[in-house]
Amino acid sequence: MQKLKESSVAVQSNRLVEASYTLTVVEQKIILAMVSMIHPDDADFFSYEMKLKDLADFLNINVKYAYHEIDNITRCLRKRELHIPEKNGWINTGWVSSCRYNGAKGTVSFRFDPELKPYLVQLKNEFTKYRIALVVQFKSIYSIRIYQLLKQYKGIGYRKFRVDKLKEILGIKQNEYREFKRFRGRVLNQAKKEFEKKDKNGDFKCDLTFELETIREERKIARLKFVILPQKCREPVISLDEVAQRKKKEPESKEQPQTVKEQLVYYGISEKLAVVFLNQMQEADILDILKYYSDLLKAGKVKNTGGAYLAKLLREGVTIKSSYDKDKEAEEELRKKQREFERKQKELEELARKKAEADQRNKKLRLEEQFDSLPEAEQEQLLLEFEKTLDKLMLEFYRKDGVQSVVVRATFFSFLDGKLSCSTDSL
């Protein structure tokens, strides 16, 4: 039985993210809890068991009434359906095939409908992942869905929808929010408001928000463009209870291992066999396998912690890196490229600004030299023409300080640029 943790990560197929369905906030949180219990290496669904008290706390339900509340919630959840688009058609299915309460153990267990397996298990590409803690805080039934839809496109930076298609995905009936003003206020603005909430330290509680652009067709708002804006937010804090649970799963040791050999011995490999592996393999490969084995232990996927399974992995030379680790590395690489792009862009913008300023200075000097080289009569004529172009306020400055006035000078150069044959561009 796994303990509910808001610091867990939910991973689901993009097709499931884009599916059309209606769930209450509480029902959505149960589904998220189940999704977070799926391990990357799972080949199939399992029965996802939770303590009734933990589930009640997770759902913000008074423990006193937890049995009856969760009984009613699960009855409704069993009836919920979703419509998933596929390449060559679609599928209509339910979320869960069963919900079981065990009074002796005080637990509730759920099973996903088998039809959902391709959208939740062994995902290698086209998936969206996010931290549970970021979505369980939302109060609106639509904020979670909008967050998932935008998270899917966060790397692209924007996402477009037809208004009617977005309503369909969100499970909004045709007779609801017919006026766009109400839809925007009750659904879209509410989501934005929740995305931009801050904690007591002034940090954002969500890692993204959006600006909305509307596109009209025949005087009616028909399409939307969500410009996705990243926000810095604190990583969810792992509770002390969770740390304690992790320590129970790991082998005890008086001292924290330092060298690769010590780590092998720490996880149950004999010193003699550890030396053999070190002579046959690169340390980096051994460390990769140790990390993978450690993750299995933490997830409770390895029953025998005596080192036999680790030895098997080492003999096979398995260097396993999950799609999630690869995705994390790809995201970090993307962030590096984005930072480098932004740095170069700023450099180019600064160079362009300095060049523009230099061009303007040089142009003014040439105009001034050209004016000074004119016969005095022509200069006087130009000044008279310039004076006629000035309004009352500018005229006062001109009569006081002439063209040397800071206020008048720029206007004078613009006037000269239009009168004199100057090879430079217009100001």
Image (cartoon, grey):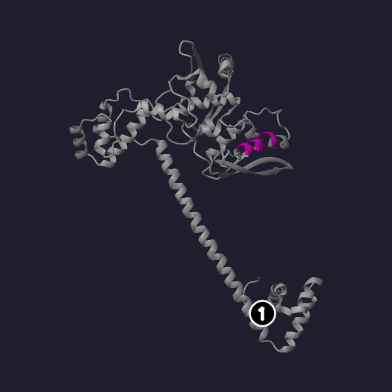
**Above-or-below relation of 134 to 354:** above
Mark 1: few/some/many CA within 10 Å (<14, 14-19, 20+): few
Q: Position of residue 151 (x, y in %)?
A: 54, 38
Q: Nearer the viewer, residue 295 or 168?
A: 295
Q: Identify the element where label 1 is drawn.
A: loop
Q: Residue at x 46, y 51 (%)?
A: 337
Q: As displayed, is residue 422 above or below residue 97?
A: below
Residue 65 colored magenta? no
Q: Nearer the viewer, residue 397 or 159?
A: 397
Query: Which quadrant of the view contains residue 73?
Result: top right
Q: Residue at x 61, y 72 (%)?
A: 360
Residue placed furthest toward the top: 104
Image-quadrant location for residue 2? top left
In the displayed structure image, the side of residue 332 where residue 133 appears, left or right:
right
Classified by dominant secondary structure, the portion drawn in magenta counts as helix
Q: Amino acid at mark 1?
A: Ser
Quick one: quadrant of the C terminus?
Answer: bottom right
Q: Residue furthest front?
A: 254
- Quarter that holds the N terminus: top left
Residue at the disc numbered 1:
421
Answer whether residue 341 is visible to the viewer in this image: yes
Query: Residue 316, can we see it?
Result: no
Q: Describe residue 404's horizontal placement relative to residue 257 as left or right.
A: right
Q: Which residues are magenta?
A: 185-194
Q: Is residue 132 left or right of residue 269?
A: right
Q: Where does the image place residue 204, in percent across and percent down from the top left? A: 57, 41
Q: Position of residue 196 (x, y in %)?
A: 61, 40
Q: Is 190 included in the stretch rendered in magenta?
A: yes
Instruction: Give the percent coordinates (x, y) of residue 102.
Output: 48, 12
Q: Is residue 75 above or below residue 20?
A: above
